[in-house]
Image (tube, grey):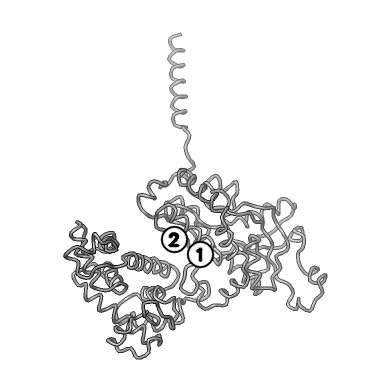
Amino acid sequence: MHMKKILLLFLMLVIMSCQSSKEPELDNNTDKFTRDLEEIKESGTLKALTIYSGTTYFLYKGRPMGFEYELLERLAKDLGVELEMVIAKDENDLVELLQNGEGDLLAYGYTITESRKKQINFTTPLYLSHQVLIQRKPEYWRQMKLHEIKNYLVTNPVELIGDTISVKRNSSYASRVKNLANELGGSIFIDTLEGTMSTDKIIQKVAEGEIKYTIADENIAFINSSYYPILDINTSLSLSQRIGWAVRKRDTQLLATVNQWLDKAKKTTDYHVIYNKYFKNKRLHKKRVISEFYSLNENKISPFDEIIKENADLINWDWRLLASVAYQESQFKPNRDSWAGASGLMQIMPATARELGVTDPYNPGQSLKAGAKYLNQMIDSHEEVKDSIQRIKFALGSYNCGLYHVKDAQKLAKKQGLDPLIWDNNVELALLDLSFPEHYNKSFIKYGYVRGEEPYNYVREIFKRYEHYQKFIDN
């Protein structure tokens, strides 16, 4: 009897041990990292994980654009944080990068599927779409009758049995091919494409006859087919599907806040204007696709890249940073005049232009050379600032509002207990204060009032754009 009790006790201990070792555990893929809303706000930066795409995020004529990008800018502003775009080189890596903490929000037109929901939490849908087959019409389709074109094309998914469709491995399109084959009771083969290839480039390959078929969401297919009329996108392969963004499983505060923001945003005219710009406006899309200043086509920012590079070399700057200054000044419009009397690509004031030997302020070469020289002078005027990036920021602030206003701001910063040799969150804040009489009327302030918001925003916007240029354009 005593032996039975010992055996029973032993069995109970074993069972308890097994139970304790089988506590509920999160999916390994969902518990690698967490950074919820509070930490994001504390850091001051929302890291949005996305990919290059002609609708999501790209550069056009020196300006970052995209459906996701424009919405993210508004979301970040609403949260009171800076936006940092994190680019995945391979679309297949998006979920893993999110889980590993490379970004806070997966901001890409991601189809909401049951298998993906096991790994990540989706936001409220941004829009609905359905998947369509993208195929090429006959070469001389314009001379053919409608029924002849239809006879050439796949108009019913069952006709795909035994054929091959080219899609990326982890895409919802690959899942659709597998499900479709199962539904139809026949084999449809997948030609696996690299995850580094954008949907736009895959569609282009169909248009050029390099691949036979691919699949895309109808809105993306529509806007791309506006440039490639030889494409047919009329064969639907799915019912309506929800497209959303995503966060990590444990970042529930962020999810709730983004959902609340999206619910409000989708009711605004602004949201629909942005959607139509990227998914409905055929004219704008065609204009971008043919432009050599569209980052999906060429490694160019502006028509003045070569002159910018020459002058950036003279002052040992990254040419993309000087390009960002030129865009900030004139949006690359060499004939521009400002209300204050500044002219040309680098918006140089007449007196400064004369000092720097400018005879034609509208000549891009002269303007850029003078602008680079003047920036170099401003760099030399802040030799007390030892950090090279901070010194560039002081130079840019001086270029915008004047050297002596910045010197005043340094004095004010010191009096306020701020660091006069650090621009970020120190001297830039003192410049803001010089907009108010209680500060610019102080006895040690020699040059008085300055519209501090202008240099404050000027420097920040140049560096923010420079970050975009670094992501898109090789040095």
Q: Given the current orientation, which residue lies at the most extreme top position?
A: 1
Is residue 187 or residue 241 the one in the foreground? 241
Q: Given the current orientation, which residue lies at the most extreme bottom position?
A: 359
Q: Residues within 10 Å of mark 2 (few under 14, many from 20)?
A: many
Q: Secondary structure at mark 1?
A: loop
Is residue 261 or residue 195 the one in the foreground? 261
Residue of label 1: 57
Q: Mark number for residue 456?
A: none
Q: Residue at x 36, y 73 (%)?
A: 321
Q: Is residue 130 left or right of residue 40?
A: right
Which percent across, then down, holds residue 177? 67, 56
* Kind of residue sitting beneath label 2: Met
Q: Is residue 226 left or right of residue 94?
A: right
Q: Residue at x 51, y 74 (%)?
A: 294
Residue of label 2: 85
Marks 2,1: beta carbons within 8 A:
yes
Q: Is residue 96 left or right of residue 239?
A: left
* Kind of residue sitting beneath label 1: Tyr
Is residue 104 or residue 212 the one in the foreground? 104
